[in-house]
Image (tube, rainbow, N blue to C red):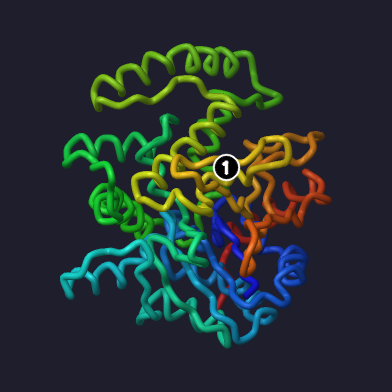
Amino acid sequence: MKTAIVSDLHLGANSGGDVLRDPEIRAVLAAELRGADRLVLLGDAIELRERPVGAALRHARPALEGLAAVVGEIEVVLVPGNHDSRLAEPLLDRLSIDDEPLALDATADPSPGPTAEIAAALAPARLRIAYPGVWLRDDVYATHGHYMDLHLSLPRAECVALAAIRRLARPLPDPARPADYERIVRPLYGLGYGVAQSLPRRPRRRDRGPSEAAWELLAGERPGRTRRRQMEVRAARAAFPLVVAGVNRLLHAEFESEISGDSIFRSGVDGAAEMARRLGVDGGHVITGHTHRGGPHPGEGPWRLPGGGQLHNTGNWVFSTALHRPGTPPNSYWPGTVTWLEDDGPPRRVELLQDREHHELVELAARARGIDSAPAPAR
């Protein structure tokens, strides 16, 4: 069986950086997926934190229908992530009603609501929901990877919020079960989804989200800054270690104040490895998304797991101006990746958009934002 795995499509993102909105890029992915026997959407397929669910699904539908047109009557496994965690709620509710534990690979059919809409868009493919992950082979476990946020040393806002919840709740045990992670992450994800339902259907235009803006402020360079803005940036960077130290004292956390490409990369690999160890899936191949950083890349060597297995990240389909600079070659966060898995052998990742220029994706995102902000046609 040939399984294609894609992660972090973020269809409907306010930034317009969800590149599968573009018909030409959808055609590139479609050509790659021909002949797949199974397709796995490994989390954050639809952006459900930035606009109401109905608007998000309408934005996602063309891309989903494009996938359906090429894959045909195969199985599509949707593994919800942190940005589309709402899609796992019917499954979690059913387990609670039946008083059953959450397994590593709990599954459910689509139910009335968002998953039924997704299933209709993907027809004639057969949709199955799996959460928090799915065994694709006896030695290959795939999960979006958002549980790793409880182990990251990077002080992202979401990681800090989870540390606060963990401080108030019972500590995460070692080893841990999916339910142990869920009692910490589920309240935050529910809040994020609930807030999105009250947001405007046509969000304000912006080229990057809060996380990307913070990264750019603390570690990046943005040309054309005024002298006053440069002074504000220097002050923010100087104060950041003190803020992190205060957060660590308050929450009994161990966040690091170093914000660099290397520290972010290492935090993601280490956090995913700790997640895999605690869940007991670290003896084989573990495939994640979530961090948007595909890998391992040539020259990095295998990403070893404590139990002797290997970690893989399938990358993303989102372009962010904060992570990609004009005139530089595509880096590890460049969108357009698919991971292939067959009956034997390790996962194999392919990069489909390496020939795209930076300005092309900037213009693509700007067009998408312009369409979002255009007035609705008169009825």
Q: Is residue 135 left or right of residue 325?
A: left
Neighbor class of circle 1 (other Cα within 10 Å; few <14, some 14-19, many 20+) is many
Residue drawn where x is 46% and y is 57% of the image: 143
**Res. 219 image quadrant:** top right
What quarter of the picture does the N terminus occupy?
bottom right
Q: Is residue 84 above or below residue 166?
A: below
Q: Is residue 9 above or below residue 209?
A: below
* Rendered location of residue 240, percent (x, y): 43, 18
* Rendered location of residue 188, percent (x, y): 30, 49
Residue drawn where x is 77% and y is 35% of the image: 326
Question: Looking at the image, which is closer to me, 346 or 76?
Answer: 346
Q: Is residue 285 above or below residue 107?
A: above
Residue drawn where x is 35% and y is 50% of the image: 279
Q: Which residue is mark 1?
A: 208
Q: Amino acid at mark 1?
A: Arg
**Res. 79 image quadrant:** bottom left
* Rendered location of residue 123, percent (x, y): 56, 85
Question: Looking at the image, which is closer to me, 249 or 282?
Answer: 282
What quarter of the picture does the C terminus occupy?
bottom right
* Rendered location of residue 229, percent (x, y): 58, 19
Question: Secondary structure beneath disc 1?
Answer: loop
